Image (cartoon, grey):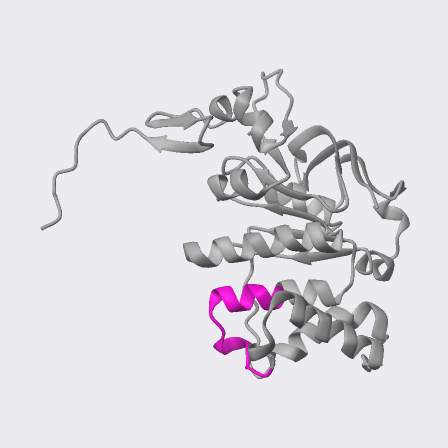
Amino acid sequence: MTFELSELTTGYQTSKGERVVTSGISAQLQAGCFTCLLGPNGAGKSTLLRTIAHFQPPLSGHVLLGGRSLEAFTPQQLATHIGVVLTERPNIKGMRVREMIAMGRSPYTGFWGKLHAEDEEAIDDAIQQVGIRELEHRPVHTLSDGERQKVMIAKALAQQTPVIILDEPTAFLDFPSKVEITLLLQRLAHDMGKTIFLSTHDVELALQTADLLWLLRKAITESTEAPLVIGTPATLADNGVLASFFDAPGITFDAAARRFNINSGGTPRATAP
């Protein structure tokens, strides 16, 4: 199912009028594609994600799912199409992992939340896909950050949506956990045909794993450059876009290796004994 942004302007209504964060964005997210959104702090990545997920309305333009504007869906319908994993850590004591994952079935279980055989099957499948069977009966508040993030991804999988949107899913994780979560999301996109879209500051990890990159510029009033640049990591590396996008003192981009080098301007002051 195609997810399309059409001349989208994001931002907020304030007492002084509209505060535009990003404007004029047109793009598509495709099924089976692992897409990473990159950009500097203040570029509006979280605002864009929240607008795409229909947590806040666009100032203008449209977000279309299968050709229909998100405004045409009821909240329950949207919950069967879009799963969302936010940066905030759930602080729920007394709830076990399986119970947390079962919350992903709420669009299907009705007011009373009674789980049926198909719901239990969806929960079991999500647990299996993420590989957290040993955590199933652990209290959520006892989990590490990496374990907790896996649980939230499993909850989104149990929701059985074609689209999963994640805001900084690796923000609080150590490097091995960052790699594990990123590769898990890549696999879910490729093996299950999910549309996986996430924002991240882990640039080099995104360069090595993403099918597509969305590079979001920080808004500059007088700039005539497009607010969003889209391409494969290889294309954006080879055509110089990545080097210019992350141009800053002390940083150079190696297009061949697809990595950034830090130019400290000095030599190490200490050596190993």
- Up/down of 26 relative to 206, above or below: above
Q: Nearer the viewer, residue 260 or 50?
A: 260
Does the magenta run of residues contain 192? no
Res 225 quadrant in image: top right
Q: Is residue 62 left or right of residue 201?
A: right
Q: Nearer the viewer, residue 180 or 26?
A: 180
Q: Residue 79, can we see it?
A: yes
At 56% from the left edge and 23% from the top edge, which residue is drawn?
220
At 62% from the left edge and 54% from the top edge, which residue is drawn?
185
Residue 183 pos. (x, y %): 57, 53
Q: Residue 173, can we see it?
A: no
Residue furthest to the left: 273
- Up/down of 271 relative to 21, above or below: below
Q: How many marks?
A: 0
Q: Nearer the viewer, residue 259 or 107?
A: 259
The majority secondary structure of the magenta stretch comes to: helix
Residue 13 pos. (x, y %): 70, 40
Does the magenta run of residues contain 143? yes
Q: Is residue 139 left or right of residue 32?
A: left
At 29% from the left edge and 28% from the top edge, which residue is drawn?
263
Q: Is residue 98 left or right of residue 258?
A: right
Residue 164 pos. (x, y %): 71, 53
At 67% from the left edge and 55% from the top edge, which residue is drawn?
188
Res 125 quadrant in image: bottom right
Residue 24 pos. (x, y %): 72, 27
Q: Nearer the viewer, residue 30 or 13?
A: 30
Q: Which residues are magenta?
A: 137-152
